[in-house]
């Protein structure tokens, strides 16, 4: 097994030998170029041969049965003669000009099986067989070409010179050539199908191959333009364009190999989606701006003459003005075409923000919008509350700590501070562009939702604090009522009893003090009556028997007829006291200010709420004023989390409706 693992490294050694012989200028080796050009091409040649061989060897060392590794190894050695390292004799040159399809053979083969080493399905076997046949048949037919070699090898005669080639061979290479071309497009289709099917690591690996393989059609277009313009139509081709083709083809080989190596070993290390996006955007912009500049220069140059400074200035200004809108348009098009989920997700967030501005949706729904945009339904958004140093859900539920359930965490940052955390699937970390794009678009909505949650929690705390204050006040009133009843009142009663006892034991000559003592006892009785009224104002004693009993007792003491319709079981003492004092104030106002002749009081419980209504037939026109009785009633009811509504048209009586939460 160790020998099997080390065997792949013989291929890089063989490539090093071939490159070394070319560098040493071996008399029987050449690079189809002059010695000066050899020095320029040699670095590209070295990388083009060593990149696929080394990457293939490393993959084969770890995974000896991986077919991708052996395709790269065999491809590197088979393309060495094509790359120019060939013995300088006729048969070698014949092979050199016939085997150029091998430059594309191994990248296309890898495209069919990358990244798992298997075809998409068995139905692809005939496709691969046809592609292999076209490559082999084309190279075999090209080997039978008896024509002279191209410069600088025109002095060397073809070994098949004078061979009679049947006429059918003059055209049969055409369908084979188109078959090779079609195999490239089919390979691109295979990569595209894998991209649509793949997810997670497999998708990122395929993206690396797709990015580098995009150089292959560019090389074909380059070759096609040179062939059409220079070889067939005889148009002049700049030397720099012709000379750069060969290094480009070598760089293409190396780029495909290196991208495969990164995809297999370190696909998470680099943002390939961002790299592809930026490559397409700036390549498109470069072509569009160059075409714009050239078009303006040609049109205006035909009017003002070539070389005019103002023509150049106008063309440059037009390109500068078109840069920003063009980049926005191109970026949007590329995102929509190549990163559809991110594009659709960002648009969904922007549409949600518009609905929030229009009042159709609540900002707290941003968590559901983000999870749908990311395609991760279990994702959960929790808000960071700096005041309380804790997290909270959109519902207002506080979290002691974030759930440790294996989900990944991504912070949403606004102005350098974390405002929320998204708990999501760990697979989304492999698509940072998608995650960052959607979270960045949602940052403003998240901040608004966080502030609303924080304000709502603070209001709840204020209401709870107010309820505790009300409850404490009520308990304090009960304490005062007990103290008055059991303390001062009892002491006064005891003092009156003692005075009466002393009055009865006075001697006859001291009975003149009787009237004075009677007056003192009467004053004590009046003080006791006042204390009882004060105690009743603090907390009516009838509330000990419940709200219904207290309301009926209040109706009996009223100076006008009061109809009480109440069927309420016992409630919390503070709620009963609040309802009683509302009824007292409403009855007092009806008698004192409204000149009412009848008053109706209704009290019942419905769905956990005490509903109290006090209606009279008075003059109406009651208005809530700050510091007056009605405003005080409203504050008392609000302190219990309830609501108070006043309906009092002029001449139509007054109706006060109160709703007090009374859930136990």
Image (spheres, rainbow, N blue to C red):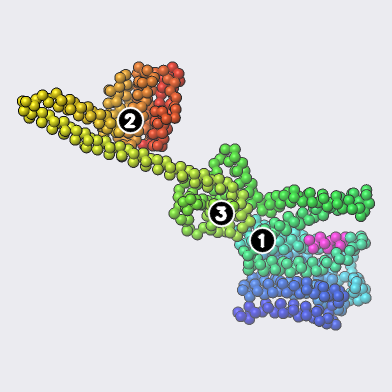
**Secondary structure that dominates the magenta span:** helix
User: How many labels sit on residues?
Assistant: 3
Residue 493's place in the image compared with 124, above or below, is: above
Q: Which one is nearer the viewer's eye here, 39 or 115?
A: 39
**What element does badge 1 sit on?**
helix
**The C terminus lies in which quarter of the figure?**
top left
**What element does badge 3 sit on?**
strand
209 drawn magenta:
no
Visible in this render: residue 117? no
Give the residue at x 82% y 49%: 318
Q: Where are the magenta residues, as a range?
A: 218-228
Give me the disc on residue 352: none
Dot 3: few (<14), some (14–19), or many (≥20) neighbours within 10 Å?
few
Q: Which one is nearer the viewer's eye here, 201 or 459?
A: 459
Quarter of the rendering containing residue 33: bottom right
Give me the disc on residue 272: 1
Give the residue at x 67% y 77%: 8
Dot 2: few (<14), some (14–19), or many (≥20) neighbours within 10 Å?
many
Q: Which one is nearer the viewer's eye here, 354 or 621?
A: 621
Give me the disc on residue 580: 2
Residue 152 percent coordinates (x, y): 90, 73
């Amino acid at each position: 097994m160790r020998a099997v693992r080390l065997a792949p490294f013989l291929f890089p050694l063989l490539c090093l030998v071939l490159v070394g012989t070319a560098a040493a200028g071996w008399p029987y080796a050449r690079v189809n170029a002059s010695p000066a050009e050899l020095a320029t091409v040699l670095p590209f040649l070295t990388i083009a041969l060593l990149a696929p061989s080394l990457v293939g060897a490393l993959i084969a060392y770890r995974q000896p049965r991986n077919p991708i590794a052996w395709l790269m190894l065999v491809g590197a050695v088979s393309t060495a003669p094509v790359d120019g390292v060939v013995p300088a004799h006729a048969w070698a040159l014949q092979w050199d000009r016939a085997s150029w399809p091998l430059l594309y053979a191994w990248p296309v083969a890898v495209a069919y099986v990358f990244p798992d080493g298997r075809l998409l399905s068995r139905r692809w076997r005939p496709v691969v067989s046809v592609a292999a046949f076209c490559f082999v048949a084309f190279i075999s037919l090209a080997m039978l070409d008896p024509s002279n070699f191209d410069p600088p090898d025109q002095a060397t005669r073809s070994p098949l010179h004078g061979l009679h080639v049947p006429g059918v061979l003059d055209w049969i290479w055409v369908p084979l050539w188109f078959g090779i071309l079609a195999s490239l497009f089919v390979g691109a289709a295979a990569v595209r199908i894998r991209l649509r099917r793949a997810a997670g690591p497999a998708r990122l690996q395929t993206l690396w191959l797709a990015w580098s393989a995009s150089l292959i059609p560019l090389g074909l277009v380059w070759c096609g333009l040179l062939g059409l313009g220079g070889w067939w139509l005889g148009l002049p081709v700049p030397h720099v364009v012709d000379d750069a083709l060969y290094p480009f083809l070598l760089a293409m080989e190396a780029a495909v190999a290196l991208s495969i190596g990164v995809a297999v070993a370190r696909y998470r290390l680099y943002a390939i989606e961002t790299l592809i996006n930026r490559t397409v955007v700036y390549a498109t912009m470069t072509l569009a701006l160059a075409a714009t500049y050239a078009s303006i220069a040609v049109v205006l140059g035909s009017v003002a003459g070539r070389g005019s400074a103002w023509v150049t200035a106008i063309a440059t200004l037009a390109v500068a003005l078109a840069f920003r809108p063009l980049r926005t348009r191109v970026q949007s098009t590329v995102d929509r075409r190549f990163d559809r989920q991110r594009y659709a997700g960002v648009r969904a967030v922007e549409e949600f923000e518009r609905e929030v501005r229009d009042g159709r949706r609540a900002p707290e729904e941003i968590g559901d919008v983000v999870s749908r945009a990311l395609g991760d339904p279990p994702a959960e958004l929790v808000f960071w509350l700096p005041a309380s140093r804790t997290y909270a859900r959109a519902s207002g539920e506080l979290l002691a700590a974030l759930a440790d359930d294996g989900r990944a965490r991504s912070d949403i940052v606004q102005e350098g501070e974390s405002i929320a955390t998204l708990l999501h699937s760990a697979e989304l970390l492999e698509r940072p562009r998608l995650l960052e794009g959607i979270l960045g678009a949602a940052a403003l909505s998240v901040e608004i939702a966080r502030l609303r949650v924080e304000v709502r929690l603070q209001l709840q705390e204020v209401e709870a604090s107010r309820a505790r204050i009300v409850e404490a006040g009520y308990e304090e009133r009960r304490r005062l009522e007990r103290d008055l009843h059991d303390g001062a009142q009892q002491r006064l009663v005891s003092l009156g009893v003692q005075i009466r006892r002393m009055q009865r034991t006075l001697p006859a000559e001291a009975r003149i003090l009787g009237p004075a003592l009677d007056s003192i006892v009467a004053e004590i009785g009046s003080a006791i009556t006042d204390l009882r009224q004060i105690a009743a104002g603090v907390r009516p004693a009838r509330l000990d028997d419940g709200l219904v009993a207290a309301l009926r007792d209040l109706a009996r003491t009223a100076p006008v007829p009061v109809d009480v319709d109440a069927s309420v079981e016992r409630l919390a003492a503070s709620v009963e006291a609040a309802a009683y004092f509302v009824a007292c104030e409403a009855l007092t106002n009806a008698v004192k200010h409204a000149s009412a002749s009848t008053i109706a009081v209704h009290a019942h419980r419905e769905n956990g709420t005490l509903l109290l209504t006090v209606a009279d037939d008075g003059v109406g026109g009651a208005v809530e004023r700050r510091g007056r009785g009605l405003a005080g009633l409203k504050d008392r009811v609000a302190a219990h989390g309830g609501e108070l509504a006043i309906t009092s048209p002029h001449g139509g009586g007054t109706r006060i409706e109160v709703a007090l939460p009374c859930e136990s």
